[in-house]
């Protein structure tokens, strides 16, 4: 599993994944409130917007990718297969030095430890390279699979944010989980792998 940019040439793959996983992900997908009157961006516009956010230092839009031949014949990262997405968003510098993480994965790859590994990698990058202090993940109380991710990684729960985000057509409550850099001095990936034996 690798975290890498999503390519402009992966439009059909990305759209195919989103369509194939609609029943799996739609109840957790962000939506715009009706008063905004905005339509979802087509892939090229969405990718351009995410790249602009990345250049401005406000986001890290990663593709979750898989190399089916690893470890026997590892290929260059550009040849790995897209299987989902992980976004580090809302990056704040200054005295806060924080960000939030969201993710989704192709259903056929769920339950293999890929998402916790990806979240741990992204957190370590944010702490060690970007020098952020706090990483937050907000999860709907009904989303048992995502709650399991933060449990595996040892995120601390901070409370409930009522009607926090517009998800699947309405304002939804979210449970908030966070970790600060000093809570995992040897890195989150190391801690996660050690917990798995």
Image (cartoon, grey):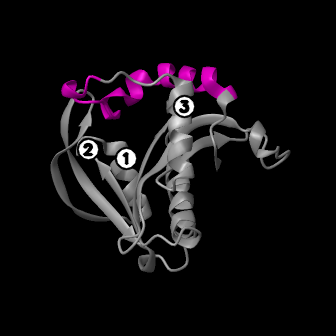
Q: CA distance from mark 1 to mark 2?
A: 9 Å
In percent of width and height, residue 192 lies at 52, 65
Q: Is residue 112 visible?
A: no
In percent of width and height, residue 164 lies at 20, 46
Q: Which mark is residue 108?
A: 3
Q: Would you say residue 122 sits in the magenta stretch? A: no
> Is disc 2 in contact with disc 3, using a CB cutoff of under 8 Å?
no
Q: Which residues are magenta?
A: 9-37
Q: Vertical placement of 186 versus 105: above or below?
A: below
Q: Would you say residue 12 sits in the magenta stretch? A: yes
Residue at x 59% of width, y 35% of height: 83
In percent of width and height, residue 26 lies at 35, 27
**Predominant SS along the magenta part:** helix
> Is disc 1 in contact with disc 2, using a CB cutoff of under 8 Å?
yes
The residue lying toward the viewer, choosing from 141 and 152, is 141
Residue at x 52% of width, y 64% of height: 126
In percent of width and height, residue 171 lies at 18, 36
- Of pointers 2 and 3, the one earlier in the residue sequence: 3
Q: Vertical placement of 140 versus 95: above or below?
A: above
Q: Is residue 29 left or right of residue 169?
A: right
> Is disc 1 in contact with disc 3, using a CB cutoff of under 8 Å?
no
Q: Residue pushed farthest right?
A: 73
Q: Vertical placement of 110 versus 192: above or below?
A: above
Q: Which residue is mark 2?
A: 140
Q: Which mark is residue 146?
A: 1
């Amino acid at each position: 599993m690798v975290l890498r940019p999503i390519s402009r040439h992966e439009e059909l793959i990305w759209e195919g994944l989103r369509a194939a996983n609609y029943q799996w992900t739609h109840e957790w997908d962000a939506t715009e409130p009706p008063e905004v009157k905005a339509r979802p961006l087509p892939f090229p516009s969405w990718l351009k917007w995410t790249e602009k956010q990345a250049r401005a230092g406000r986001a890290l839009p990663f593709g979750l990718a898989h190399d089916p031949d690893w470890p026997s014949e590892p290929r260059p990262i550009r040849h790995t297969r897209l299987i989902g997405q992980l976004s580090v968003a809302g990056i704040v510098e200054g005295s806060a030095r924080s960000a939030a993480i969201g993710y989704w994965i192709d259903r056929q790859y769920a339950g293999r430890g890929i998402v916790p590994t990806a979240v741990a990698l992204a957190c370590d990058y944010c702490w060690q390279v970007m020098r952020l202090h706090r990483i937050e993940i907000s999860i709907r109380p009904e989303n048992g699979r995502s709650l399991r991710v933060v449990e595996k990684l040892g995120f601390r729960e901070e409370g409930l944010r009522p009607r926090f985000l517009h998800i699947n057509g309405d304002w939804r409550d979210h449970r908030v989980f966070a970790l600060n850099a000093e809570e995992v001095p040897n890195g989150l990936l190391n801690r996660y792998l050690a917990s798995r034996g």
